[in-house]
Image (cartoon, grey):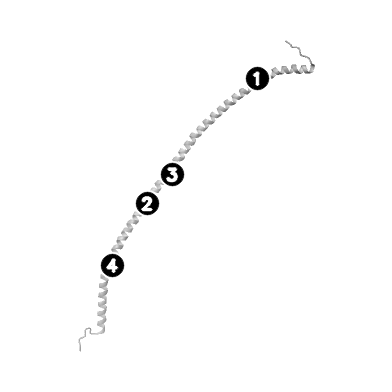
């Protein structure tokens, strides 16, 4: 009988499983060395960069919010100052308007007094003229009614 390389079927099975396991382990080690480790290193590097960028973004957001708050505070302060300035300007021009109004009232009062004086003088002139005309009208009326000239007294 010829020498058996493998004495029975069970041995063949064990050797087959052992060889497949060795091939699997060798393939696993090769894949681990050439694929998995570089992938995990790259993944870790990217996660590190990503987390670093996320932290930078959070810091920038906080800085932007601080700047926004500062801007809003400055804007509020500027609005208050503008309101204050506007109120002060209104007060100044209101005082000027009161002065102009008082001046206009004084000038109007003076003009009215002048006109009243002129009217009074005109009335007095008209009254004196009317008195002179009154005597003349009396004489004319007497002549028309009586047909004679009145005697002068005095």
Instruction: Check disc 2 and report its element: helix, strand or loop.
Output: helix
Instruction: Check disc 3 and report its element: helix, strand or loop.
Output: helix
First in residue order: circle 4 vs circle 3: 4
Image marks 4 and 3: residues in contact by CB distance under 8 Å: no
First in residue order: circle 2 vs circle 3: 2
Q: CA distance from mark 1 to mark 2?
A: 92 Å
The residue singled out by tag 1 in the image is: 125
Q: Which of the 4 quarters of the picture holds residue 42?
A: bottom left
Q: CA distance from mark 4 to mark 2?
A: 40 Å
Image marks 4 and 2: residues in contact by CB distance under 8 Å: no
The residue singled out by tag 2 in the image is: 62
The disc placed on residue 35 is: 4
The residue singled out by tag 3 in the image is: 76
- How far across and down, in percent of the image, does residue 2 sit? 20, 88
Q: Residue furthest top?
A: 154
Front position among marks 1 and 3 = 1
Front position among marks 4 and 2 = 4
- How far across and down, in percent of the image, does residue 6 sit? 23, 83
């Amino acid at each position: 009988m010829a020498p058996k390389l493998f004495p029975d079927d069970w041995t063949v099975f064990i050797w087959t499983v052992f060889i497949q396991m060795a091939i699997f382990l060798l393939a696993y080690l090769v894949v681990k060395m050439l694929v998995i480790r570089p992938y995990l290193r790259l993944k870790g590097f990217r996660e590190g960069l990503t987390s670093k960028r996320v932290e930078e973004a959070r810091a920038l957001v906080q800085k932007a919010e601080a700047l926004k708050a500062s801007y809003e505070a400055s804007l509020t302060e500027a609005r208050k100052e503008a309101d204050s300035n506007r109120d002060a300007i209104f007060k100044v021009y209101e005082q000027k308007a009161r002065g102009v109004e008082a001046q206009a009232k004084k000038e109007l009062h003076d003009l009215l007094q002048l006109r009243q004086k002129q009217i009074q003088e005109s009335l007095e002139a008209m009254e004196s003229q009317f008195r002179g005309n009154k005597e003349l009208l009396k004489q004319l009326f007497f002549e028309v009614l009586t047909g004679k000239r009145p005697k002068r007294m005095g």
